[in-house]
Amino acid sequence: MPKHNPTVSVPKSMEMKYAEIIALTDNYCSKNLNEEYAQLVRLATAALCRKKLSPIQLGSASVWACGIIWAVGFINFLFDKSTSPYVSAEDLANAFGAAKSTVSNKSKQIRDLLKMRQFDHHWYLPSRIENSSMAWTIMYNGFMLDARTLHRDIQVVAYEKGLIPYVHADKK
């Protein structure tokens, strides 16, 4: 698994496109989601800007903005009514004046490019990480285990490999 680069730095050539998309996503997140979503969306947008031949150079900023929120929301179960915040996929697409199918496809493209997957702690809302058993589940000696219950040395190795969000033993 590649190391996650949590930065919003972007190449100079992408600064305007980044700013255009972030203006849209920050506005949406401040009205409908929260600052945690806004920050993850900024990180995802920056990561897309840093891609060689960045895909966001082409196409509508509003569709990209919606697709990025959708991708981060997909990882965090945004479309599940039992979670908070909750937004329906249709309402999200409508807020950006985009077709739901177009945004869904854009979200899939983004998740593939950034190697995002469900329960990926790199893209999980920080407030949910501690209570997410999936963010802490690792394979150790052929067993699926909660890394928080393992010795600190094992946690350090798991963290260095990008398997867990932080060394839980050091949190105490």
Image: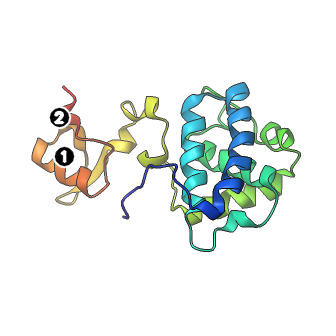
Report the quarter where the C terminus lies. top left
- Residue 132: name its quadrant: top left
Residue in the picture at 58% in, 45% down: 42
Residue in the picture at 19% in, 46% down: 155
Q: Is residue 50 left or right of residue 70?
A: left
Residue 149: percent from left, percent from top = 18, 37
> How busy is the neighbourhood of tag 1: few (under 14 within 10 Å), some, or many (20 plus)?
many
Q: Which type of secondary structure does the marked residue at label 2 adopt? A: helix
Residue bearing the label numbered 2: 169
On screen, residue 11 above or below 85: below
- Residue 50: name its quadrant: bottom right
Residue bearing the label numbered 1: 155
Q: Is residue 134 left or right of residue 36?
A: left
Residue in the picture at 71% in, 28% down: 32
Q: Is residue 94 left or right of residue 166?
A: right
Q: Which residue is more in the foreground, 22 or 70?
A: 22
Residue 40: percent from left, percent from top = 54, 42
